[in-house]
Amino acid sequence: MRRGPWLWAAALAVYAFLYLPLAIVVVYSFNDSRLNAEWVGFTLHWYDVLIHDEEMLLAAGNSLFIAFVSAFVATLLGTMAGMAIHRYDLKLLNFMALTPVAMPEILLGVSLLLFFIQVLNLTLGMLSIVLAHITFSIGFVAVIVRARLAGMDDSLFEAARDLGASPWETFRYVTFPLILPAVIAGGLMAFTLSIDDFVITFFTAGVGVQTLPLRIYSMIKIAVTPEVNAVSTLLMLLTLSMIVLASRFAPDVLKGKT
């Protein structure tokens, strides 16, 4: 099919709308001015300020800890959920695993807040954030693992059973090695979703606990300084790196192919 100039112009306009603001954030993180009103000159001062900001480093440490723990647990549970959905094809199980993926974040955040306070009588803090992130990450891992299983030939598992392998041996030597790229991709996706989540974290964080997105939000309420641009740039690089790694481990799954 021939692509006309209007189609190329429309595509370029869409990509510019998506990525130009990100490029501006990166460029102005090197601006030698406390205000972002105009470009003054190039400097690395704001990155030096960033690495000496104790509150920012504490928030970054909290985000990394929450992301690692929630991604590990969500990967474990999501892998089991994806395998169960593929094997038993139960609509209720499918609905329960995938509902957090489709549910609006603000609704999920409010519902988790009420559940933690009114049902569990749980003090909001690091534990509530980790539980919340696990909740919305499981579905993403389950979708990726299920898509990987759907693209595999079931005769492989039947052949392993015919050769005398037990269910555990079939999983260990056949199933798990084949779905490992999807498991890793799902874990990386869960990590990415956790480390830059704001809405659900905002409702479940409680008093005195800050993550990186919450810290950035509290800073931009005063003014968007180059330090905010610097930490946003680093967070953007980390997120993009995780997405690239996930796409390399399971490119067909993340593209929606089976």
Image: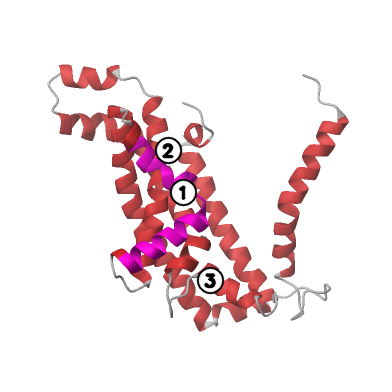
Residue highlighted by disc 2: 144
Residue at left offset 34%, top offset 48%:
75
SS at mark 3? helix
- Which badge, 1 or 3, comes first in the chain's sequence? 1
SS at mark 2? helix
Residue at left offset 29%, top offset 70%:
121
Residue highlighted by disc 1: 189
Q: Give coordinates of residue 89: x percent, y percent.
A: 32, 28
Mark in front: 3 vs 2: 3
Badge 1 vs badge 2, beta-carbon distance below 8 Å: yes
**Magenta stretch?**
93-118
Q: Which of the pair 39/125 is nearer the observer?
A: 125
Indicate whether residue 36 is drawn in magenta.
no
Q: Is residue 240 above or below residue 114?
A: above
Looking at the rendered structure, the kind of residue marked 3 is Leu
Q: Give coordinates of residue 164: x percent, y percent.
A: 12, 21
Badge 3 vs badge 2, beta-carbon distance below 8 Å: no
In the image, is 156 to the left or to the right of 44? Answer: left
Between the residue at mark 3 and the residue at mark 2, the CA separation in whole angstroms equals 29 Å
The label shown at residue 156 is none
Q: Count neighbours of disc 1 (C-alpha within 10 A) and say few if under 14, some if 14 to 19, many if 20 or more.
A: many
Residue highlighted by disc 3: 214
- Which badge, 1 or 2, comes first in the chain's sequence? 2
Residue 181 in view of the camera: no
In the image, is 210 to the left or to the right of 128? Answer: right
Snapshot quadrant of residue 26: bottom right
Snapshot quadrant of residue 85: top left
Between the residue at mark 1 and the residue at mark 2, the CA separation in whole angstroms equals 10 Å
